[in-house]
Image (cartoon, helix red, strand yellow):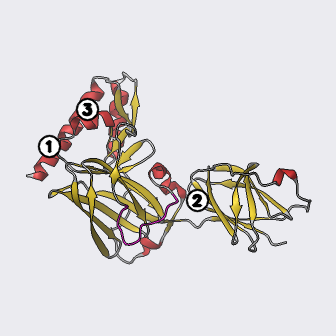
Amino acid sequence: MRSNKVILFIAAFIACLLISVVYGQDDYLNGGYVSSGSTNPDEGLSGMLQWLYQPEPNFPWYTTGGSFYSQTYSSATFSPFTQYYATYGTPVMGEIISNPTQFDITTEMPSGVYYGAGIGLPYSQYASMVPSKTNELWIKGGTNWTQYVVSPVGTKIQLIADASIGGPAGFYEIVQTDATSSKYKIYQMNQGYNTMDYYAERVGRHMLYFVVNNQPSNVIIIDVLYQVAPSIVTVPQAPAIHSPSSYTTPPAPTPISGNVPVTIMYPGLTNFDVYVDGAYVGTGSGGSFSFSAPSGPHDIRVWDGNFPYEKSVLLESGIPKIINVEAV
């Protein structure tokens, strides 16, 4: 009975997409991306079919031998999904997800939602079509939600759960490589939208869903792969100068963030100040300092109170950068 309802819902969903395209409404699917303002039905129809015929990447998870699982993949594999994961965060030990908290959909409404087959829909249309009293699970991005993501190992992913009623929810995690493992935990869900964090700690196809009041949600899939080894840059010692004023530690660091994890490796235990494009971002200790920065060229400077170290580096989107400071 439930499978028949799902089939009818999908059929109605695709029919609504075709109708909205043909009649030139404000929102349509253009190559898989939600666009607005066009009245050209041929353009909208062509774009939608292009997306339907080119679904999300299909990796060979169901092979034997294990070679696929040990491969590394370039940033191009992950670049379509970078809005859906973060390269920082601390896993909650012994848990599948962090404790669910109430999510205010009115203040963080997505622009569009994407199903596992690659079908996209403006959120306003999706919300008007979804039956009441259903349980749904999504992966939250910067602007959209999706039910499928490819991410590197060690990333944090924010989930959105829409629970038909509040109460105990069974949360299921299945991770598949050559072998399959599963976990089950009970979490307290709020009625309506909830948010929680999930950590992709190991390679594999991660399949997640939850059950509230004997009603299961949809399954989301996160394909977690190894990323190519981080690029390593050695920062040479600059000519010795005495305590330049431009390297004087400011009272507070300048906030910096981006999609490239950077680690400064310093030879010794001396504290050192780190500057990015002339702005002080923090002080390292114990031999290392980590931060995230936007992709692109940057001037990296390190000042340990005696000698300055300086290097211009290119940060590539999604590829971690390790910068080794040469010993004096």
Assess disc 2: are there few (<14), some (14-19) or many (≥20) residues with their C-alpha within 10 Å of its C-alpha: many
Asked if residue 147 can be seen in this view, the reply is: no
Give SS at disc 3.
helix
Q: Name the foreground residue: 129 vs 116.
A: 129
Q: Amino acid at mark 2?
A: Ile
Front disc: 1 or 3: 1
Q: Which residue is mark 2?
A: 319
Say which amino acid is labelled 3: Leu
Residue range highlighted in magenta: 87-98
Q: Residue at x 46, y 54 (%)?
A: 85
Q: Which residue is mark 1?
A: 8
Local crowd at mark 3 within 10 Å, few (<14), some, or many (≥20)?
some
Q: Quadrant of the C terminus?
A: bottom right
On whether residue 294 falls in the magenta region, the answer is no
Marks 1,3: beta carbons within 8 A: no
> Mainly helix, strand or loop, the magenta region?
loop
> On screen, 49 above or below 5?
above
Q: Nearer the viewer, residue 325 or 41?
A: 325
Q: CA distance from mark 3 to mark 2?
A: 39 Å
Q: Is residue 235 above or below residue 66?
A: above
Among the 4 quarters of the image, the one containing residue 121: top left
In three-dimensional space, the C-alpha distance between marks 1 and 3, rounded to whole angstroms, equals: 15 Å
Splitting the image into 4 quarters, where does residue 319 fall? bottom right
Tell me where residue 119 appears, x and y as whole percent. Answer: 31, 43
Give SS at disc 2.
loop
Whichever of callouts 1 and 3 sits on the residue coming sooner in the sequence is 1
**Mark linked to residue 18:** 3
**What amino acid type is highlighted by mark number 1?**
Leu
Q: Is residue 189 left or right of residue 294?
A: left
Distance in Å between CA atoms under marks 2 and 1: 43 Å
